[in-house]
Image: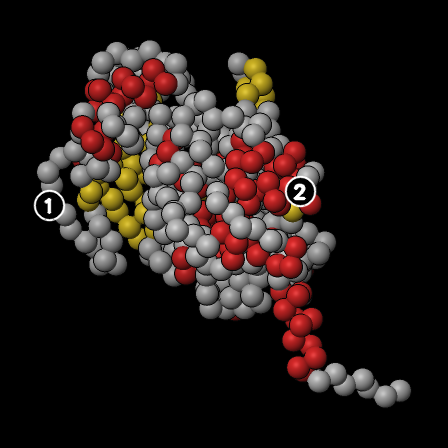
Amino acid sequence: MKTLIIPFFLLIPIILFAQNEHAEYIEGPYKTVQEVTKGCLECHEEVANDIMHTSHWTWLGPEFETPEGKKTLGKKNMINNFCIAVPSNWPRCTSCHIGYGWKDENFDFTKSENIDCLICHEQTGTYKKIPTGAGMPVEGLDLLKIARSVEMPTRANCGICHFDGGGGTGVKHGDMDDSLYHPSEELDVHMGGQDFECTECHITEKHQIAGASHSSMAAGTNHISCDNPDCHDKDPHEKKILNKHSDAVACETCHIPTFARGMPTKIWWDWSDAGKDLPGKKDEYGKPTFHKKKGSFIWKKNVKPEYAWYNGKADYYMLGDKIDPDKVVMLNKPEGDISDPKARIAPFKVMRGKQPYDPVYKYLVVPHLFGKDGFWKTFDWNASSAIGMKTVGLDYSGTVDFVETAMYWPINHTVMPAEKALKCTQCHGWKGNKVLDWEALGYAGDPMKRSVKKKRDYLKK
C-alpha cells in the first residue's frame, strides 16, 4: 500500500484550525468581558449551570459532617495563616475568582454573564486581572483577539492563580510555583519530562475538576491518585517489596523527597510584626523577610516534607472555634493513624506563623485588611478586627493578641525521576533513620529492624 504524502503547505489551514477552532465563529466586537461571556454561552448554554455548581465558582466544597451538624468549607468561609480570610477583603482576594465583580457579600452567584470564561481558556497571554479589582480584567485589552484564542486550559491558565496564591509565586504551595511553567524533567517528570498539562491528571467533567482542595479535604472527597488506571498500575515496581509499601506509604513520600526545588516557598508568616517600622531585608534567595503591611517571613528552598498519616480527610478549624492560646493552633490536621487501613504516610508542607486572635473570646480573628478602613491603610489592629468580625457575625472584645498557628498543605507536584526517589536506607537501616520519625508515626521503631509485617503491630503500647 502506498503512503499518502501531503505537502506541508496544504496542512497549514488544518493545523491552524485545530489550534484555534473557535476563531471563525467569534465575530465581536466586544466592549465588555460580560459580552464575551454571553457570546460563549450562545453555543455552550449548558456550561453556565455546570460552572455554577463548581467550587471554583462558589468557593465552597461539598457538605461534610461535624459534631455541630453538616457544614461546607472553602475559600469563602475558611481561615488560613497567609492572608487570613476572604470576608471583608473581597476585592483583593477575588481577583483570582473565575467571575467578575465579587466585591462584597452581595455578589450574585446566579448571573451567568459574570462567569469569566477567558481566565481558563484564553491563549494570547495578554489577559490579566486587576490585583485589587474583584475579578475584573485590566483595561485596554483586545477582547476580540483574546476571545478568538480560546482553547483547552494549559498550565499557564491554571498557574496564574494556583502558582501565585497567597500574594506571589511559591507563597502558599510548596510544590507549585512559576518554575512549573517551563520545568525541567528533574523538577517534574510529568510537566517537564512529558509536557503534561494540568488537565491530564486533573480530569474534568462538566467543569468539575478532579483533585482535592481544602474544601474537599474537609469532606474527604474528589481525590486523584497515581494508581489511576490511566496512569500507573497498583504494582508499578519490579520489586515486590516496593509495591507492598503502597499499603502504608503514599507514592509522593518516596517520589517527592524535597519540595520548593525550583523556587523558595514561604514557611513562616508572623502577622504580629505587621504595622511596625522594622528594617526591610532580603534573604539569601532575594526574598523579603519583612513587609510593614504583612509582617515578617521566612523562606526556604529544597525543603524536606513533614509526614503524617492521611486517609483523604482533614479536620479544619472553623470560624468561632475556641482555641488554647498556650498551644499551637492547628488550622487543619490530616486524619488517619497507623491503625487506619485507608491511611498512608504522606508528605506535607506545614505552614507556620502567628496571626490575630481575641484573648477574651478565645477564637481567631478575621481582620479587615484591604480597603479604605483596612489594616493596610490604618495599621490599626483593633479597628480592622472590629470590621472583620462584624462581617463574619462574631463578637469582638476590642482586644487583639497573636497566637502561633500551623496549616498542612499536601505535596503532590514536582515528582522527581525514579532514580532520584528515596532509597531504602534513607528511611531504614542500621545507620539510623534519616527521613521518617517512626515513633511519631506510631511505630515502636524502624519496621525493618523487626520481624513484624503488619503496620498495626507497631502501635505503641
Mark yes or no: residue 338 visible. no
Q: Nearer the viewer, mark 1 or mark 2?
A: 2
Report if residue 364 is visible in the image: yes
Q: Nearer the viewer, residue 412 or 41?
A: 41
Left or right of residue 370: residue 181: right
Q: Which residue is mark 2?
A: 42
Instruction: Assess whether mark 2 and mark 1 are in contact (beta carbons under 8 angstroms).
Output: no
Q: Quadrant of the N terminus?
A: bottom right
Identify the image quadrant of residue 320.
top left
**Callout 2 environment at 10 Å: few (<14), some (14 to 19), or many (20+)?**
few
Task: Please state if 71 lies on the left or on the right of 177 as rendered.
Answer: right
Left or right: 80 in relation to 1:
left
Query: Residue 39: percent from the left, percent from the top?
Result: 61, 44
Relative to 269, does residue 226 appear above or below in the rendering?
Answer: below
Q: On the image, numbered disc 1 is attached to which residue? A: 279
Secondary structure found at label 2: helix
- Name the spot of residue 332 as percent of width and height, x first: 44, 32
Q: Amino acid at mark 1?
A: Pro
Q: Could you tell me residue 168's position as x and y percent? A: 34, 48
Q: Which of these two is toward me, 59 or 52?
A: 52
Cα distance in 3D space between marks 1 and 2: 55 Å
Q: Secondary structure at mark 1?
A: loop
Q: Which residue is at a point 33% across and 18% down the rendered structure image?
A: 389
Among the two numbered marks 1 and 2 on one chain, the one whose residue lies closer to the N terminus = 2
Amino acid on which the number 2 mark rests in the picture: Glu
- 172 and 249: which is toward the camera: 172
Q: Is residue 180 above or below residue 30?
A: below
Residue, x 67% and y 72% (percent of image)? Answer: 13
Q: Residue at x 59, y 25 (%)?
A: 63
